[in-house]
Image (cartoon, rainbow, N blue to C red):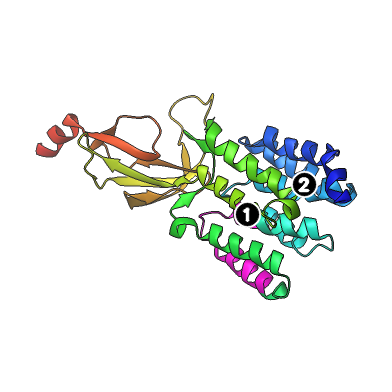
Amino acid sequence: EGESKEWLADPQSIAALGVALIASGEELGSDMAVRAYDHLIQYGDAAVRKACPVGLAMLHISNPKLQVTDVLGRLSHDSNEDVAQAATLALGIVGAGTNNARLATQLRQLSSYYYKDPSLLFLVRISQGLVHLGKGLLTLSPSHSDRSLHSNVALAGLVINAFCMLDMKQTILAKYHFMLYYLFVAAQPRMLMTVDEDGKPIPCAVRVGQAVDVVGQAGKPKTITGMAQHTSPVLLASGDRAELATDEYIPVTSMLEGVVIVKKNPAFMAEDKD
């Protein structure tokens, strides 16, 4: 009881979490924050260290980068129970809806490691469920419109869980396990579907690849790299961008994600007849 009251008076863990919230949604800031968290994990006290896995998860929601999953995997075996618990659930948030095979293997190993600890085993099972969220068709990422905007509602749900993760013994692992449902405020489909004006699905040739920042470049630079051609509907991973492969259809929106209305291109039809 004394420990929980002591934590409530400690603003350091909140400050460590704030670093992630400020840096999220921006590639360069995220990389710098990860480096800052590495230092905090090494030199911070207990309150700061238990906030580090939560911060790393908030920076990489549904984006399981190798560097981050390795750090979280290491922290999930930490001698401090609070850190291990936060890191275990953080692995689930980082891999939410990605079906990441490496992460799934990591969590299976964790479940056999913690088979005697009911609290940690419960968190491992939750994380395993999150990795396969919606059979890999959903994401928890609050960013949309080509990562230029954040959904406030989704972010609020994630922040509620982030605060619960700072004091799990009193929240998720006690009477308030239903707080986990707040995560699903952020759940949204991660596929691109093309439909006509009546809402009927239209299969279109779509190129999907890693997004490239082309702001300020002259001419018509390529907006994606390492592209692969698919027929819609198609899944978009974190950092992916899609564009229509042919001129047969014209999209109504400039950003291709979620459900996109497309119109037949009359010029393309004329060319076809020639």
**Quarter-wise, where is residue 82 in the image?**
bottom right
Residue 224 % position (x, y):
47, 41
* Residue at point 58%, 37% (across, down): 155
From the image, which quarter does the C terminus lie in? top left
Disc 1: CA contacts within 10 A as few (<14), some (14-19) or many (>=20): few
Kindly report the distance in space between the C-alpha atoms of the residues bearing marks 2 and 1: 19 Å
Q: Mark 1 points at which residue?
A: 177
The residue range painted magenta reads 91-111
Any magenta on residue 98? yes
Q: Which amino acid does label 1 sit on?
A: His
Q: Mark 2 points at which residue?
A: 51
Residue 95 seen by the camera = yes
Any magenta on residue 72? no
Residue 56 % position (x, y):
70, 47
**Relative to 46, 181 lies left or right:** left
Residue 223 % position (x, y):
46, 36
* Residue at point 65%, 61% (across, down): 123
